[in-house]
């Protein structure tokens, strides 16, 4: 296994070097553990729907566009932009909810930040973005330094030698236009929040530093910790000390000519569980640099229709969550907003969350880990994308590997999900089979899943008839009996059968309700309908053979342009168990009651 993991890290590094510009550097992990200078705050912006700042009237790239960030100093010179006199946006944040005129806007917005910096000769510097939705072209001091595609994963550029002492300028062309060949494609069911939606920072490192590492329990062995370290720099033959003081582990490693070293050590850690989310202080020291992290240890595997956490059967009492802030209802970006959402899940009795339909911010994962919430982490291979397009596959694989690279040391992530509600077909099966293989190449210890769809094979008998199920570790699927498929009473007549003997996870179920709207049990969009649907759904789910987990759709009402019913939806998907204003609906307490029963059952 060590050989496979070692090969994977070098393949991954090569992969990242080819998916964006030549100046893009491999992702630096554990940013919060490094020396950083925040670039968050107010940025100047220019809204540019025709991309005048990047292309001329022949649609050819400009040599001297908005990325040059020139001030108007001579009024006789024609210049049709001026960051200094234009409007501002706060970073991190989406533009849709910050300025009313940008609520529905999809296109280009230019962001500009000027900042002072003092060059340090013994330091390397990287410009880091937590995420930009969707395409980013980045300029530093008037020169383009790189590009990135994908709205939910981090990226960074080395800017050592490009920064100057004194005032510097960063300009980012952000474009969130939906495209047929993109991931996700033009059709989805959440708000296409544009902007620099996560933190921006300068990261300072020594000349040679720890760029990446992996420290987890060996697959199926709760008494062996294994891992590796990857250095970045010119002098890559170094001594690296790995320490876990509480376990009395101190390993001194010597990296090879490529800066890589692997290790394996016997230990008896207290395993991470939802009831006791134990994390250990882990440090990596090379020369005078110490990079610290908190890491939990656990095993996750399947046995027949059971999911085993640390060798013990567990039921995943979950809920789906979009990365949309409580109350404010824009893209969530702060630790406080993440904790609010996760605490609602805890209040419902959850030990598991499905973070849909894309990688959430890193703090969301870390806070869930500290709160004892297992995580299903997903990429936006959603509905119908261009399965036969090599560039679309390359995009999806890049987002997948970015996500794994950032979060591979988080004990609470137990499932990497590669798709949601995708149509059956040979090209799609090949596409997703390749992604599943890539997951297992980079991370052989976690489970692989996807949200598939159900089929009614005869009246009242449901199954999953999808060849992808043979590739997955869990039989996970979405079903909306009682909402998109009949009325709630249909749940009483439905039973389930499966050919695969794998753990079953119902990755979505539920229906819409506007908080406070009351009516009869068959009056749609009322809390009474939703509550009755949940009561009947729970009774139906109890009859599913091999049921190992559920994640109702969804924790909180969230914005979606598809939801246009005036005075009911008003641009919100109303399937939340909590309203957009934080009010718990009647169905919330149905799930809370059932999850308490399951908690007692699986003690």
Image (spheres, rainbow, N blue to C red):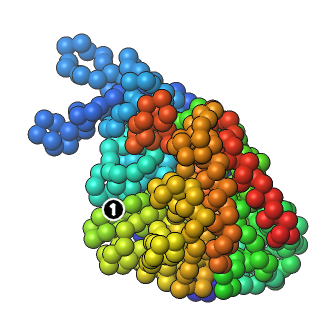
Determine whether, in the image, residue 360 is placed left or right of residue 281.
left
Q: Residue at x 77, y 77 (%)?
A: 313
Whether 174 is drawn above or below 436: the answer is above
Q: Quadrant of residue 510?
A: bottom right
Please state which of residues 287 and 384 is positioned toward the viewer in this rendering: 384
Of all residues, the one furthest to the left in this rendering is 58
Q: Residue at x 49, y 79 (%)?
A: 469
Please state which of residues 155 and 133 is positioned toward the viewer in this rendering: 133
- The residue identified by callout 1 is 385
Across and down, in percent, residue 315 comes to 73, 69
Whether 551 is drawn above or below 514: the answer is below
Q: Visible in this render: residue 481?
A: yes
Give the number of callouts.
Answer: 1
Across and down, in percent, residue 34 comes to 66, 51
Please state which of residues 242 and 543 is positioned toward the viewer in this rendering: 543
Across and down, in percent, residue 465 comes to 45, 78
Across and down, in percent, residue 285 comes to 73, 64
Whether 332 is drawn above or below 487: the answer is above
Q: Residue at x 58, y 73 (%)?
A: 495
Q: Visible in this render: residue 243?
A: no
Specify the quadrant that holds the N terminus: bottom right
Q: Report helix, strand or loop for mark 1.
A: loop
Q: Residue at x 41, y 54 (%)?
A: 150
């Amino acid at each position: 296994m060590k050989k496979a993991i070692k090969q994977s890290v070098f393949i991954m590094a090569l992969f990242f070097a080819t998916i964006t510009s030549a100046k893009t550097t491999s992702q630096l992990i554990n940013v919060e553990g490094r020396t950083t200078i925040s670039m968050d705050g107010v940025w100047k912006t220019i809204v540019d729907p025709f991309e005048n700042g990047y292309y001329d009237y022949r649609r050819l790239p400009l040599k001297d566009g908005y990325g040059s960030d020139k001030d108007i100093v001579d009024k006789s010179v024609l210049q049709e932009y001026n960051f200094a006199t234009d409007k501002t946006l706060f970073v991190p944040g989406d533009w849709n909810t910050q300025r009313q005129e940008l609520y529905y806007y999809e296109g280009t917005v230019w962001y500009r930040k000027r900042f002072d910096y003092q060059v340090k000769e013994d330091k390397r510097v990287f410009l880091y973005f937590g995420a930009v939705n969707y395409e980013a072209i980045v300029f530093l001091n008037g020169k383009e330094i790189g590009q990135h595609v994908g709205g939910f994963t981090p990226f960074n550029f080395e800017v050592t030698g490009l920064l100057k002492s004194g005032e510097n300028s960063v300009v980012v062309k952000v474009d969130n236009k939906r495209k047929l060949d993109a991931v996700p494609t033009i059709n989805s069911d959440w708000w296409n929040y544009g902007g620099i939606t996560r933190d921006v920072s300068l990261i300072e490192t020594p000349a040679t530093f720890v760029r990446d590492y992996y420290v987890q329990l060996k697959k199926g062995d709760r008494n062996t910790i294994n891992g590796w370290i990857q250095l970045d720099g010119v002098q890559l033959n170094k001594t690296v000390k790995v320490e876990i003081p509480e376990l009395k582990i101190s390993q001194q490693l010597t990296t090879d000519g490529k800066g890589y070293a692997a290790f394996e050590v016997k230990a008896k850690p207290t395993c991470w569980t939802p009831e006791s989310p134990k994390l250990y202080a882990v440090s990596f020291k090379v020369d005078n640099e110490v990079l610290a992290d908190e890491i939990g240890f656990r095993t996750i595997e399947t046995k027949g229709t059971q999911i085993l956490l640390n060798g013990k059967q567990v039921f995943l009492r979950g809920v789906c969550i979009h990365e949309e802030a409580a109350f404010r209802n824009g893209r969530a970006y702060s630790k406080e907003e993440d904790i609010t959402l996760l605490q609602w899940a805890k209040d419902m009795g959850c030990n598991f969350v499905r973070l849909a339909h894309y990688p959430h911010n890193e703090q969301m994962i870390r806070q869930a880990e500290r709160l004892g919430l297992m995580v299903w982490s997903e990429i936006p291979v959603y509905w119908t994308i261009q399965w036969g397009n090599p560039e679309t596959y390359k995009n999806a694989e890049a987002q997948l590997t970015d996500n794994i690279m950032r979060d591979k040391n988080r004990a609470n992530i137990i499932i990497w999900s590669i798709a949601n509600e995708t149509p059956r077909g040979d090209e799609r099966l090949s596409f997703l089979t390749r992604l599943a293989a890539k997951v297992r190449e980079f991370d052989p210890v976690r489970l692989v899943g996807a949200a598939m769809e159900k089929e009614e094979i005869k009246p009242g008998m449901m199954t999953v008839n999808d060849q992808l199920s043979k590739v997955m570790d869990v039989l996970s699927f979405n079903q909306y009996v009682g909402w998109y498929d009949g009325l709630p009473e249909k749940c009483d007549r439905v039973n389930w059968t499966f050919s695969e003997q794998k753990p079953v996870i119902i990755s979505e179920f539920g229906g819409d309700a506007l908080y406070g709207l009351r009516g009869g049990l068959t009056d749609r969009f009322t809390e009474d309908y939703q509550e009755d649907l949940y009561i009947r759904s729970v009774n139906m789910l109890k009859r599913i053979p091999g049921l190992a987990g559920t994640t109702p759709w969804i924790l909180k009402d969230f914005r979606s342009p598809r939801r246009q019913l005036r005075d009911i939806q008003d641009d919100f998907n109303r399937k939340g168990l909590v309203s957009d204003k934080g009010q718990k609906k009647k169905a919330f307490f149905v799930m809370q009651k059932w999850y308490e029963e399951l908690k007692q059952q699986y003690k």
